[in-house]
Every structure is written in C-alpha cells, then in structure tokens.
Amino acid sequence: MRFLIRAKIPTEAGNLMVRDPNLLSKLETYINKVKAEATYFFEADGNRVAAFIVDIQSADQIPVLVEPLFSGMGAHVELHPVMSLDDLKKGIPQAVVEVNSYRN
C-alpha cells in the first residue's frame, strides 16, 4: 500500500542539516533505501518538510522508514495512506455499494 511519509523538520535541526556538506548524499541514500516513488521538499508552518511516497507491504517496515527521519533529522513524522486516481476509481463504486447497503 502506498503511504505518504511527511517529515517536518524543526528550524534548528534544519539549520544544522543544511550546513552538513553530506546532506544531499544522505538524502539520496535514504530515498534509494526506502525506494521512494516520489520525493518533494517544501515549507509548511514555517518548517522545512520532506515528503516521500513509498510502498509499505507490512507494518514491520515502518521503523526502517521513519527512524532515520526521527533520529537523523530530528523530524516530526506522519504516515498517511494515499491513493492514485486509479485506486479511487476502483474504490468509489465499492463505497457506493456499502453506503447504499446501510440505507436499506
């Protein structure tokens, strides 16, 4: 199942990170290790944020995915299941059937 991993990096931790000459290679190593399908960087609420789309097959993968962000970046980490448009196209008809079954 696809998940969005959102790592919000507090300002002080982020300031230290950008001074690290190995920052980009560390990010690339993490991205390759977790096999991120997509990666984005942006600002939210005045903090640096990194977002990674990953495929999680089982819950035991979660520590491997998030611990480097907690301990390596001092990030506040969130995981959110996400859908593609194709997933939504498959799911909506099933949801309509479920909703209609509760109405009857």
Image (cartoon, helix red, strand yellow):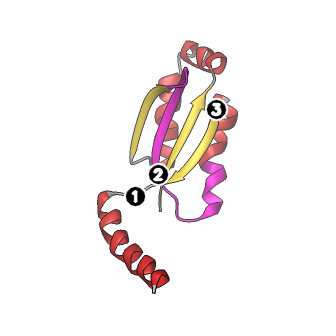
Q: Residue 93 carries which label?
A: none
Residue 74 lies within the magenta run? no
Distance (Cα) linking label 3 and label 2: 17 Å
Distance (Cα) linking label 1 and label 2: 12 Å
Q: How crowded is mark 3: few (under 14 residues within 10 Å), some or many (20 or more)?
A: many
Q: Nearer the viewer, mark 1 or mark 2?
A: 1
The residue where tag 3 is placed is: 75
Q: Describe the element under mark 3 as helix, strand or loop.
A: loop
Q: Which mark is residue 83?
A: 1
Residue at x 67% of width, y 43% of height: 67
Residue nearest the observer in this picture, 55 or 6? 6
Residue at x 29% of width, y 63% of height: 86
Quadrant occupied by the C terminus: bottom left
Whichever of callouts 1 and 2 sits on the residue coming sooner in the sequence is 2
The amino acid at mark 1 is Met
Q: Which residue lies furthest to the bottom in this view?
A: 104
Residues in magenta? 44-64
Residue at x 44% of width, y 76% of height: 99
Q: Where is residue 65 in the image (x, y as percent from the top left)?
A: 59, 48
Distance (Cα) linking label 1 and label 3: 24 Å
Q: Residues within 10 Å of mark 2 (few under 14, many from 20)?
A: many
Whichever of callouts 3 and 2 sits on the residue coming sooner in the sequence is 2
Q: How crowded is mark 1: few (under 14 residues within 10 Å), some or many (20 or more)?
A: some
The amino acid at mark 2 is Val
